[in-house]
Image (tube, helix red, strand yellow):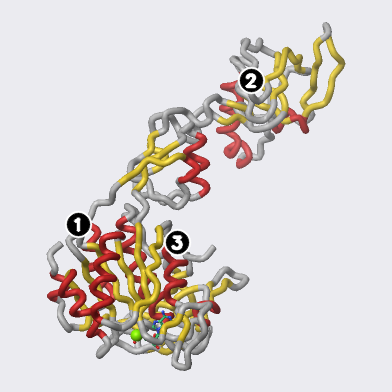
């Protein structure tokens, strides 16, 4: 990539400008791939289209337990004509005459799931059939067992009578071969993140492995002399390290392997070697803290030695400032996130997540955005995007409503816990009145 994003200088960037510059990095680094067995694919992103080698289902089969029969020859046309004519007939006040089915039906065998009936079923005969069992040759219609009653056997053959023949339609309760996925069609496209249903679908095609983008490794560390690992005694001036763990959770939800490099003190020399080692071991490096104006001293010399870096002021709140660049000869993307715990999560969701997904090959990804009406007035300032922590719900009519979680300080991590979304108030907007419409991004990283 050209380092045009670093030429952006000290100007205040819009959220979209920052995102575009960050995503420019993904184009420069095509992801590597690996082939994994089905059981290891959840959460991974397909790197090639998957074409179905088979019809799903393989056979035309019964959708109900009951009997399979061949619709009487000659009546098929009559039936279809009758169905097409139904609406018109009703308009003209005519009665609908049900088809006469030959009664009763003689059962000549059975087709069970896993054990089909292979012979041709003669006219006016039927076979009993179970759900999923192949339709025997000559049959095209299933009548469910609830609509059947026993009739006296004849010549040692069981017979059944259809209780409501007027409801029977040619071709009913039959699943056509290939109606789910036809052979030779693309069943899943490259860039799909594989969830439970995708794994099930692959399995239903008989596919037991797939090519996916290699798992990204992301190194994280926290910075700050006051930052203390949970489990350690808290010094007088200390604060427990929240960011490494919220980042770990966010990264893990994206299927990333996390390399936890712990907490670094605010010294320049420690940083140089830490960044260099991290860049050698990982596909991306994320730090939190130490990028506030006046505190950035450690990171500038470190980056001068080991990479290229831009300090960005982005017109958003929370989330200023953000350092972004690349490290080492590997040119590993680097994010220096703010120190405040809410700012870390918000900037991760808005900037780090899209780059990770892009690097994983999920090219079409966009955050889910919903529109809701504000339950109360919401503060924001024009000229920047405000991301408030919000709680949304649907009322009885399905209308979404959203309110803020209350105090919005970027250190108040309990506001993220209370929220189920970020309310995104666009830059031009100077505030939202109660009842006005706002955009929200539901939290998708949970669960
Ligand atoms: P900084 O960007 O380093 O000035 O940090 C901004 C604020 O975030 C300060 O109050 C820090 O103490 C706090 N902070 C920085 N890192 C962490 C962390 N890992 N966990 C919790 N709070 C942090
Ligand atoms: Mg700090």
Tell me the crowding category of disc 1: few under 14, some 14 to 19, or many 20 or more residues within 10 angstroms, Cα based: few
Which residue is the site of mark 2?
A: 71
Which residue is the site of mark 1?
A: 28
Q: Is residue 9 above or below residue 204?
A: below
Q: Is residue 437 above or below residue 284?
A: below
In the figure, residue 90 lies in which quadrant? top right
Observer-nearest of 77 and 48? 48
Depth check, mark 2 against mark 3: the one in front is 3
- The reply to whether discs 3 and 1 touch (Cβ–Cβ < 8 Å) is no
Observer-nearest of 39 and 81? 39
Mark 2, secondary structure of its residue = loop
Q: Which disc, if any, is residue 252?
A: 3
In the figure, residue 76 lies in which quadrant? top right
Depth check, mark 3 against mark 1: the one in front is 3
Quadrant location of the N terminus? bottom left
Ligand 1 quadrant? Answer: bottom left
Q: Is residue 394 above or below residue 375?
A: above
Instruction: Write the residue at 34% across / 48% down.
Output: 213
Q: Is residue 341 above or below residue 92?
A: below
| Farthest right residue in view | 152
**Residue 418 x %, y %:** 55, 79
Does residue 191 appear left or right of residue 126 in this picture? left
Mark 3, secondary structure of its residue = helix
- The reply to whether discs 2 and 3 touch (Cβ–Cβ < 8 Å) is no
Label 2 vs label 3: CA separation? Answer: 56 Å
Q: N-terminal of the two: label 2 or label 3?
A: 2
Q: Can residue 433 be seen here?
A: no
| Farthest bottom residue in view | 236
**Residue 145 x %, y %:** 76, 30
Tell me the crowding category of disc 3: few under 14, some 14 to 19, or many 20 or more residues within 10 angstroms, Cα based: some
Q: Which disc, if any, is residue 37?
A: none
């Amino acid at each position: 990539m050209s380092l045009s994003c670093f030429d952006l200088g000290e100007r205040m960037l819009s959220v979209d400008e920052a995102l575009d510059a960050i995503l420019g990095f993904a184009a420069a680094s095509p992801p590597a791939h690996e082939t994994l067995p089905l059981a290891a694919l959840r959460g991974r992103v397909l790197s090639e289209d998957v074409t179905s080698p088979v019809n799903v289902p393989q056979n035309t089969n019964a959708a109900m337990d009951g009997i399979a029969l061949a619709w009487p020859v000659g009546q098929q046309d009559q039936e279809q004509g009758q169905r097409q004519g139904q609406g018109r007939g009703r308009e003209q006040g005519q009665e609908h005459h049900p088809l006469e089915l030959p009664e009763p039906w003689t059962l000549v065998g059975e087709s069970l799931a896993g054990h089909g009936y292979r012979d041709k079923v003669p006219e006016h005969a039927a076979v009993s059939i179970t759900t999923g069992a192949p339709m025997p040759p000559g049959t095209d219609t299933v009548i469910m067992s609830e609509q059947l009653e026993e009739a006296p056997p004849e010549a040692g053959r069981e017979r059944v009578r259809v209780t409501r023949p007027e409801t029977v339609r040619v071709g009913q309760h039959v699943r056509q071969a290939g109606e789910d996925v036809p052979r030779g069609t693309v069943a899943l496209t490259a860039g799909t993140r594989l969830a439970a249903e995708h794994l099930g679908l692959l399995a239903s095609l008989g596919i037991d492995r797939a090519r996916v983008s290699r798992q990204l490794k992301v190194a994280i560390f926290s910075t700050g002399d006051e930052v203390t690992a949970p489990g350690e005694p808290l010094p007088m001036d200390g604060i427990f390290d929240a960011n490494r763990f919220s980042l770990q959770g966010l990264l893990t939800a994206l299927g990333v392997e996390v390399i936890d490099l712990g907490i670094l003190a605010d010294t320049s020399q420690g940083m140089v070697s830490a960044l260099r080692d991290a860049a050698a071991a990982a596909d991306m490096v994320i730090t939190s803290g130490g990028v506030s104006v006046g505190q950035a001293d450690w990171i500038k010399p470190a980056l001068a030695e080991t990479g290229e870096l831009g300090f960005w002021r982005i017109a958003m709140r929370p989330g200023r400032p953000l350092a972004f660049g690349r490290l080492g000869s590997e040119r590993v993307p680097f994010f220096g996130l703010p120190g405040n715990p809410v700012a870390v999560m918000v900037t991760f969701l808005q900037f780090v997540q899209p780059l990770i997904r892009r690097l994983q090959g999920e090219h079409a990804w966009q955050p889910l955005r919903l529109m809701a009406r504000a339950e109360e007035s919401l503060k924001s300032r024009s000229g920047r995007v405000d991301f408030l922590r919000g709680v949304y719900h649907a009322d009885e009519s399905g209308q979404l409503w959203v309110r803020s979680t209350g105090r919005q300080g970027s250190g108040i991590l309990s506001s993220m816990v209370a929220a189920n979304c970020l309310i995104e108030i666009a830059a031009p907007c100077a505030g939202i009145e109660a009842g006005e419409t706002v955009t929200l991004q539901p939290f998708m990283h949970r669960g």
